[in-house]
Amino acid sequence: MKRFLSVFMICLLLTGVFSDIVYADEAVDISAKSAILIDSVSGEVIYEKDPHAKMYPASMTKIMTMLLVMENIKSGKITINDSVSITQQATSLGGTQLFLEEGEIRTVEELLYGVAVESANDAATALGIYIGGSLENFASMMNNRAKELGMNDTHFVNACGLHDDNHYTSAYDMALVSKELLKHEDILRYTSTWMIDVYIGKNNNKLRTLANTNKLISRFDHIDGLKTGYTEESGHCMSATGKTASTRLIAVVMDCTNASERFDDAKKLLDYGFGLYEGTYPIKNGDIIGEISVINGEKDKVNLIADGDVYAFGPKGSFADPERKIQLTEDVLYADVKEGMVLGEVLVYNGEKLLGKVPVVTEEAIAKCSLKEYLKRIVNIILY
């Protein structure tokens, strides 16, 4: 009987009763007309289905809008606390809205929540006009950035994704811009918000409770973005991202027949990737790689650290024992030693394959020792 139960339990596990992860020997079957699954760091493609087909992105457009917002914040051109005056052009749109009033003042952060959580067209347009000076100029900025990212199947007309025959993209291009947006980790504070209360109106007297259009973030802890979309012409689409351990993946599905199919397809692709692949950092920026002697310094040694990350992505278990090889330009240093002096590089191999390399630099500055300290050292050598 025990033997029978053991065999029965194994069979259940093999058939996936206890898990919805898709494994290597199972086919990935999705309904979306176009889709792609990539690693968010390396950009390696794990799965694709007609990824370069030109599609209408609907509100997935707002990924590019959010990217330009985050880049302008990072460059210091704007801040999240900047006041944005809402124009008539922003309030005159249809589709999903915050229902902003012409002339009311909202902060960049409030509008960013409106875009990331509610997928509000008026909030996205207001941000576009604020950054670009006009919606037309902002669309040009979007297209220029798309070209820089290699989004060759894309052309934007507006900041929000309302339908226009000349406003199109592809699953591959949406993965590219999603990958770029995720370099700004602060964006996840907005895209992972499930519900939030906001006040709108000229008198701040209208309370709205926003619920994220990305239902996956409320169902699965490891999924924290990124953006859904829907128009009659685009069908249901989304770019979904999630992270387990050091692996972050991006799944884009386009032209699904309904919202449930969209979420199911995106989750299925993410599960497939997490079940089979992993990303790892054999070296992280700031890791101590070794040390080197310092002559005539206040300290006789200084740590050598990695100046950057080495990242590897591939099938699970592929990087069990990476090997470091350090190549230095100096055998010893003489004080003064400056912080951040480049002394060579560290190379990381997986077998014979080079995974990556980064510069090796000094961790801190080491000043020359004083004459008094130098004489003290000589006395100690003679006596001891």
Image (cartoon, rainbow, N blue to C red):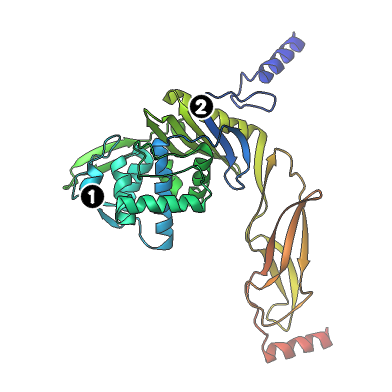
- How many badges with numbers are in the image? 2
Q: Is residue 292 above or below residue 163?
A: below
Question: 43 or 165: which is nearer to us?
Answer: 165
- Residue shown at 62% from the left, 74% from the top: 339
Q: Which residue is mark 2?
A: 32
Placement of the C terminus among the 4 image quadrants: bottom right
Given contact means CB atoms under 8 Å apart, are the residues at marks 2 and 1 in contact? no
Q: In this rendering, is residue 334 above or below 86?
A: below
x and y, in percent, of residue 358 in the image:
68, 61
Residue at image coords 43%, 50%: 143
Q: Position of residue 338 (x, y in %)?
A: 63, 77
Decide which of 48, 203 is in the foreground and name it.
48
Q: Residue at x 61, y 30 (%)?
A: 272
Q: Which image quadrant is residue 63 in?
A: top left
Q: Residues within 10 Å of mark 1 (few under 14, many from 20)?
A: many
Residue 222 visible in image:
no
Report x, y in % for residue 201. Answer: 19, 44
Q: Nearer the viewer, residue 288 or 369?
A: 288
Q: Amino acid at mark 2?
A: Ala
At mark 1, the secondary structure is loop
Q: Which residue is mark 1?
A: 86
Is residue 112 placed above or below 301 in the rendered structure? above
Q: Quadrant of the N terminus?
A: top right
Residue type, label 1: Ile
Q: Name the front one of labels 2 and 1.
A: 2
Horizontally, residue 305 falls left or right of residue 171, namely right
Q: Say whether disc 2 or disc 1 marks the residue closer to the N-terminus.
A: 2
